[in-house]
Image: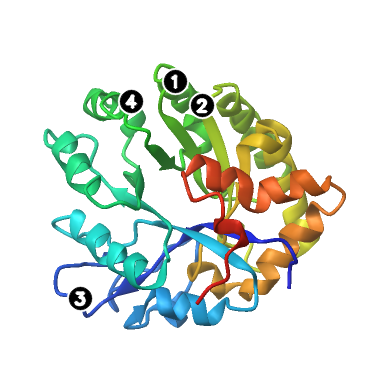
Amino acid sequence: MAELPFTDTHVHFYDLTEPALRYDWLRPDAPVDPLTGPDAPIRAQRYWADDFLAETRFHNVGAVVHVQAAIGTPNPVDETRWLQAFADRLGYPQAIVAYVDLTSADAAETLDRHAAYPNFRGVRDLRYDGYLSDPAWRRGYARLEGRGIVVCDDPAVEEMEVARDVVARHPGTTYCVDHAGLPTQRDAEYFARWRAGMRALAAAGNTVVKISGLGMGDHRWTVDSLRPWVLECIEAFGVERSFFGTNWPLDRLYSSYGDVVDAYAEIIRDFTADEQRALFAGNANRIFRIDADADESTPP
C-alpha cells in the first residue's frame, strides 16, 4: 500500500441497467479494442462508486475524478446527474469530467446543463476523426474559454503539435493530456516520436499531463517498463503540471489497483516529499478544484 494520499484522476463507473444511460463499449456484442485487448472481465452489469470504494479501501484514495464512460447516451447530462447522486450519497466522485460534443451547435447549452451539478469540472469529447483540424470542433473548444473547465483529451502522437497550437490560443482553458498521451507502442522509435510530441504539448503553459492507463499498451508491464514513460511525462511538463490516475476498472485487466499505485510510488521515491505529495494528490486537487482537504480524507 502506498503511504501517500492519492487522488485518482481517471476512473469509470457504469451501470448497464440504467435506462437513460448507454455504454456502447461495454455491450456484450461490442468489438474488442485492439489496444486494450480482450476485456470480458470488466463487462459486468455495473461498477458503482460503492464498488470502487470497496475495492480500493486499503489504498488511501482521498479523492476521485470520474471521466465519461456512458458512450452513446443520447443525453450526456444524464450521466452527470447519475454520478452526482453518488457524490451526494458517498462523497465520491469529487470531480466529474463529462461528455460534450464540441462540434454541436448546442454545445454551450449542454455545458450549462452539466454545470448545474456542483461536481462538474471538465469535458471529454472522445473522438478520432481529425477533430483537431475541424473548424466546428475548434469553435466549440473556443466556447470553453473563461468557464474554468478542464478538457481531457488524448491526441494521437502525430497530432500533438496541432493540439498544442489549438490549446495555446485559449490560455484560459486547461488542456489535460490523458493517459500520458496514450502511447500505443513500446519500441525506441515510437518512444522518440512520442517524446517529441509530448514536449511540443508541454510548451503550451495551459497543458497538464495525466499519467494513467499505461497498462493498455503494455499488458505485462513492470515498474521498469513504466518508468521511462512516467519520468518523461514529469520531465516534459514539470512536477507542478503532472499527476497520476489509474483508468480503473479497465486497467484491472493488467494488474491490481495496489500494483498501479505502488508502481507510481516506487518510480518517484527519490523525489522530495513535497513533490511526491503534489504528484499523488496536490496538483490534481488544484487543477480539478477539489477541496484542499480531500487528500486527507478517508473513504466511508
Tell me if label 1 and label 2 are in contact, CB under 8 Å: yes
The kind of residue on which mark 2 rests is: Asn
- The answer to which image quadrant residue 222 occupies is bottom right
Q: What separation in Å lies between label 1 and label 4 (alpha carbons)?
A: 9 Å
Q: Is residue 199 above or below residue 21?
A: above
Q: Between disc 4 and disc 3, whose residue precedes?
A: 3
Residue at (34%, 72%) from the top-left corner? 89
Residue at disc 3, secondary structure: loop
Could you say where residue 18 lies in the image, as x and y percent from the top left?
Answer: 20, 75
Return the mark for residue 196: none
Mark 1 = which residue? Answer: 171
Structural crowding at the residue carrying mark 1, measured as other residues with C-alpha within 10 Å and reported as few (<14), some (14–19) or many (≥20): some
Residue 217 appears anywhere in the view: no
Mark 3 = which residue? Answer: 18
Structural crowding at the residue carrying mark 3, measured as other residues with C-alpha within 10 Å and reported as few (<14), some (14–19) or many (≥20): few
Q: What separation in Å lies between label 4 and label 2 (alpha carbons)?
A: 13 Å
- 288 relative position to 231: left or right: left
Mark 4 = which residue? Answer: 146
Return the mark for residue 206: 2
Could you say where residue 199 lies in the image, as x and y percent from the top left?
Answer: 64, 28
Q: Between disc 1 and disc 2, whose residue precedes?
A: 1
Which of pointers 4 and 3 indicates the residue nearer the eye? 4
